[in-house]
Image (cartoon, rainbow, N blue to C red):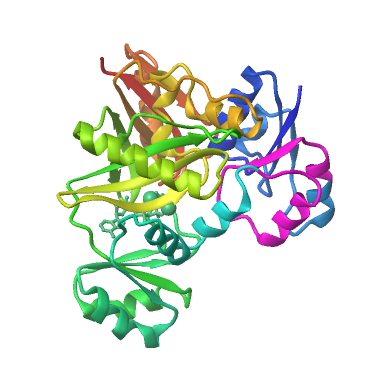
């Protein structure tokens, strides 16, 4: 069988490796950190930094295709890999999603609604951005933010200077606050043949900036469901994307607003492991391996809940609960805010 290279050895890389193994593939993980969660289940692990050209080249040459579980991969590393091995999804999706400003401009260019936004390259740009976007607003670093890190909510323009200085001179973008009724996400897959298959949209609840639960079905109308799936398909096709993407959306009375896209399997798609014949991880492996996409029809109602930090103390009880599937990531050390696992409850 073929070998799939995965950049990043976190829980997403782990679950991708499990899915790949089920289809007879081997996975080779590239990860700078020691003891990556994916390392337990992968065929091979390279522990090296992204500026280690020799290690990257050897990694690329040892695999048939390279994919990734996170978006902040240095361009120089991608250049080295691509000289040897195809990368799926392609680099354009990474380039766009690495930078919130580029991402918003791209989405707007597709005719999709995004929050009002303004570039804040430095403190001097703040007044103009505030005048344009108004408050309440959210100031976000353009790069490297996740789980609500690198962002500050501004209730008044007076909060802005302080918030920007706390971003340590990182270029930022100011976003108008979207008064949404719900948050949903579409986990969409596009195969090498250009066919798109979307999982049923999930409804997401965040706690302290981190995804807490995803519920399917989402409480949305049939028309909203159709809109969500069509706009996701538009994004993947525009990028000539191959693989799974997470598309985060705000539901508003005026229609759907795109919050952000993630060019990878997504936490809000974990419910598919117990709600579909083919889950998001297998779907991604199928796509990057050039297989046909599988059947992602939802056959159950599911609530996915993340197990974060001390939630691990609930594992003994959860292990006894009916209609409950536990997924643990094998992380040795429990830290506050750290994603340790998740649980999928079949509710119908
Ligand atoms: P992730 O872990 O999903 O990558 P992130 O750090 O990239 O998160 P965002 O998705 O941009 O952060 O924002 C986190 C959450 O903050 C959103 O899911 C939403 O609840 C809220 N939020 C972000 N931007 C806005 C906005 N413009 N208006 C209203 N709420 C927002
Ligand atoms: Mg994000
Ligand atoms: Mg998000």
> Relative to the observer, which residue lies in front, 331 or 294?
294
> Relative to the observer, which residue lies in front, 96 or 195?
195
Residue for point 38% across, 88% down? 124
Total marks drawn?
Answer: 0
Left or right, 89 with respect to 335, comes to: right
Left or right, 17 with respect to 200, comes to: right
Q: Is residue 72 magenta?
A: yes
Q: Quadrant for the N terminus, please.
A: top right
Q: Is residue 267 magenta?
A: no
Q: Position of residue 145 (x, y in %)?
A: 45, 59
Residue at the extreme bottom: 124
Left or right, 109 with respect to 113, comes to: right
Confirm whether residue 132 shows in the render.
Answer: yes
Confirm whether residue 203 shows in the render.
Answer: no
Q: Which residues are magenta?
A: 58-87
Residue for point 39% across, 17% down? 319
Residue for point 48% across, 24% down? 279
Q: Is residue 326 above or below residue 83?
A: above
Residue for point 32% across, 34% down? 201
> Relative to the observer, which residue lies in front, 22 or 109?
109
Residue at the extreme left: 253
Q: Position of residue 312 (x, y in %)?
A: 41, 31
Q: Position of residue 209 (x, y in %)?
A: 33, 51
Q: Position of residue 263 (x, y in %)?
A: 51, 46
Q: Is residue 23 above or below residue 99?
A: above
Q: Quadrant for the C terminus, please.
A: top left
> Relative to the observer, which residue lies in front, 340 or 254?
254
Residue 46 lies in quadrant: top right
């Amino acid at each position: 069988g073929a070998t799939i290279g995965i950049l990043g050895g976190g829980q997403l890389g782990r679950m991708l490796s499990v899915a790949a193994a089920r289809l007879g593939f081997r996975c080779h993980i590239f990860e700078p950190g020691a003891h990556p969660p994916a390392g337990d289940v992968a065929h091979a692990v390279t522990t090296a930094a992204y500026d280690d050209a020799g290690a990257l080249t050897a990694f690329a040459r040892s695999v048939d295709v390279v994919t990734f579980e996170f978006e902040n991969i240095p361009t120089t590393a991608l250049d080295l890999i691509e000289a040897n091995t195809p990368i799926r999804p392609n680099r354009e999706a990474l380039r766009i999603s690495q930078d919130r400003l580029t991402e918003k401009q791209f989405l707007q260019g597709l005719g999709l609604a995004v929050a009002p936004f303004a570039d804040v390259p430095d403190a001097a740009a703040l007044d103009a951005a505030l005048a344009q976007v108004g408050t309440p607003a959210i100031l976000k670093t353009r790069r490297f933010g996740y789980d609500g890190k690198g962002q500050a909510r501004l209730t008044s323009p007076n909060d802005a200077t302080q918030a920007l200085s706390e971003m340590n001179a990182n270029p930022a973008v100011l976003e108008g606050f979207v008064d949404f009724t719900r948050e949903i996400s579409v986990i969409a897959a596009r195969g090498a043949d250009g066919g798109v298959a979307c999982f049923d949209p999930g409804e997401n609840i965040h706690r302290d900036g981190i995804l807490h639960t995803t519920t399917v079905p989402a409480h949305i109308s049939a028309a909203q469901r159709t809109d969500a799936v069509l706009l996701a398909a538009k994004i993947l096709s525009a990028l000539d994307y191959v693989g799974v993407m997470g598309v985060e959306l705000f539901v508003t009375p005026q229609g759907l607003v795109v919050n952000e896209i993630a060019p990878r399997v997504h936490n809000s798609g974990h419910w598919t492991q117990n709600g579909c014949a083919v889950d998001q991880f297998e779907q991604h492996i199928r796509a990057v391996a050039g297989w046909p996409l599988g059947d992602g029809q939802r056959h159950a109602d599911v609530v996915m809940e993340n197990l974060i930090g001390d939630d691990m103390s609930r594992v003994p009880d959860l292990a006894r609960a009916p209609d409950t599937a536990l997924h643990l990531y094998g992380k040795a050390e429990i830290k506050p805010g750290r994603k340790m696992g998740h649980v999928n409850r079949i509710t119908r």
